[in-house]
Each structure stands twice: as C-alpha cells, then as structure tokens.
Image (cartoon, grey):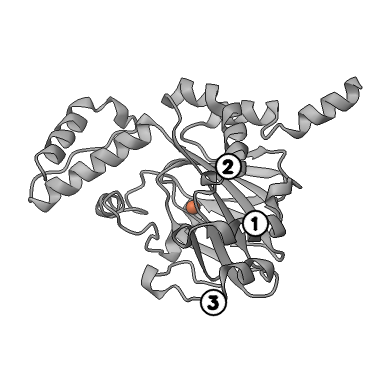
Amino acid sequence: MTAHRSIMADATVTFPDSARDIFAAAYPDQPVKLAHGLVGHELLNLHALAELAERMPAASVEYNLGKLPLGVRPEDTPANGLTLGETIRTIESNGSWAVLKNVERDPVYAALLDTALAELEPIVNAQTGPMLHREAFIFLSSPGSVTPFHMDPEHNILLQIMGTKIMTVFPARDEELVPAQKSEEFHNGGHRNLLWQDGFKARGSAFPLAPGEAIHVPVKAPHFVENGPAVSISLSVTWRSERSVAESELHSLNALLRKRGLPVGTVSPKPERQGMRRFFYRIMRKLGA
Ligand SMILES: [Fe+2]
C-alpha cells in the first residue's frame, strides 16, 4: 500500500527535486536542461490535443506548413490547406506546425499548469518576485519542422512530451542579435520573429530535447527550433515577473522617446530597479503618449 501510494504521488510530480535544484541555480538568466515527469500524461497525446484544439477559440490556435527557412517574414508564412483538427490528427504526414495558445483557459489544462508551476514557485518568488500572468502553450510539429529564429516575452520552460527536437538558444540582451529598435517594436505589438544572419549560428547553444527533458528559456533569449524525425509534442509553461514587466515598460518608454527624437535610456539587467524611468513611462502613458 505504501509503495503504491508513493508511485501515485510520483506520478503527479512535474519537476523532480534534481530538476528543481538545477532550475534554482540557473533562473532567471541561464538556459538549462531539466528533467520532467509528464511523458505519457493523458492530456498530452494527439487524440486529447485534437479534441482540445476543436473546442478552443480560433484566435487561440495558429498553424501552418512546418518546413520553413530559419528567417521568415510573418506575412510570408504559408498555410497548409487543412482544418486544425485534421492538421493534428494527421500531423505525422502533413508537414505542419501548430500551436495551441492559452490552453490554461481550459480547466483541466489549467490544473496541469498550476501543478507544474506550484513546484517552482518558491524558487521564482525568491529570484524575481511573484509569478504573474501564468500561461501554457502546446506545440505540435511534423517531422523536420522548423520554428524560425524569434524571441518571447515570458519566462518559459518547454517540456518535451513526444518526439525529439533541438532548440538553439542565444544570449538575451545582445544588441547585435536583437537591435534595440527591434526590442522596442516587439514590446509595442511587433512580431516575435527576428532577422536571421548565418554568422549568428556560432553564438547559440544547441540543446537536444527528448521526451522527459525540458529546457528553461530566459526572457527574450532568441532561439530557433528544429524538429527531429518524428512527430513532436511540447508543452510550454510560462509566467511573467516584475522584472519581465519592467523590461517591457522600459523598452516601450524608449520607443516613445525615439519617436520624438529624444535620447533613449539603458535597460539594465535588473530593470525592476529602474523605478524612476518606469514611473516616467507610466506618467507618459497616462498623458496619452
Ligand atoms: Fe519560442
């Protein structure tokens, strides 16, 4: 009975103790691989995900052909000619890529996200304050799909559930990879895809991911993803923090200043401490800037 209970308890652990220790040493600035326990979870197979996708609002799903070059302008992304349900059920052979956004709006997936993040919350709280705006995304990709070079505004852990992929992660805050003006546009609704140059490749670190492995991706660390030879399912659990919110505010302030021909300010590695500039940005927003 005791052994049985301990197996049941283990089944609900998303990040084992060893993964939490590794995460604690890396968060928030370093990309790092972690182990996770969600492989084989009943909510994360193709059947369950096709059903989830079909009950989600159309605005929360995005899908397209999966074999893309590393750099793609958003308007050039090709459609695959299938419905979303068909795309997921036949993803083994249709050469596609799909993302289900904000799956936490579905109560059972909300519980999955809450359980996973609760295990990390004490570590996050100690480093970057309360976990804000928790969201979950599920990525499905055909063999050989590529997710082009881009950045995301959240603290993110991507958990590989099925199939393999290689995520190549680049340093955040490198203005040769992401010019300041691109960061400013990004925080004002600009697209997440970044301009790619072949010379960048050597600056990235490649992290191969197999089922049961996860990767912590720091806020706005540029990355691209190459799918392996089988269908891939990944779950991304994300949150914001006072630091990520402050970073966004300071780049938005710089965008306003740049538009007016005024000198822009530095965004420090600890932007949450730049209280005066954040206050100034909020005043400008209130004044309708
Ligand atoms: Fe991403």
Q: Quadrant of residue 92?
A: bottom right
In the rendered image, which residue does mark 3 sit on? 80
Q: Earlier in the sequence, mark 2 or mark 1?
A: 1
The residue indicated by pointer 2 is 107
Residue drawn at x 57%, y 76% is 82
| 215 vs 289, nearest the viewer | 289
Q: Which disc is residue 96 wearing?
A: none
Secondary structure under the numbered disc 2 in the rendered image: helix
Return the residue at label 1: 49
**If the image is split into quadrants, where does the C terminus sit?**
top left
User: Could you give the CA–CA distance between mark 3 and mark 2, rounded to whole angstroms?
Assistant: 30 Å
Q: Is residue 86 visible?
A: yes
> Can residue 163 be seen in the rendering of this structure?
no
| Disc 2 from disc 1: Cα separation | 14 Å
- Kind of residue at disc 2: Pro
The percent coordinates of residue 197 (x first, y second) are: 41, 64
Query: Badge 1: few (under 14), some or many (20 or more) residues near its Cα, within 10 Å?
Result: many
Q: Are marks 3 and 1 in contact (CB under 8 Å)?
A: no
Cα–Cα gap, marks 3 and 1: 19 Å
Residue 237 position within the rendered picture, expressed as x and y whole percent measured from the top left: 55, 42
Compare marks 3 and 1 and give the one earlier in the sequence: 1
> Where is residue 112, by image quadrant?
top right
Mark 3: give few (<14), some (14-19) or many (20+) Cα within 10 Å: some
Element type at marker 1? helix
Q: Nearer the viewer, mark 3 or mark 1?
A: 1
Side of 143 relative to 152 (left or right):
right
| Position of residue 80 measured from the top left corner of the image (x, y, whole percent) | 54, 77
Q: Position of residue 260 (x, y in %)?
A: 7, 50
- Mark 2 surroundings: few (<14), some (14-19) or many (≥20) residues within 10 A: few
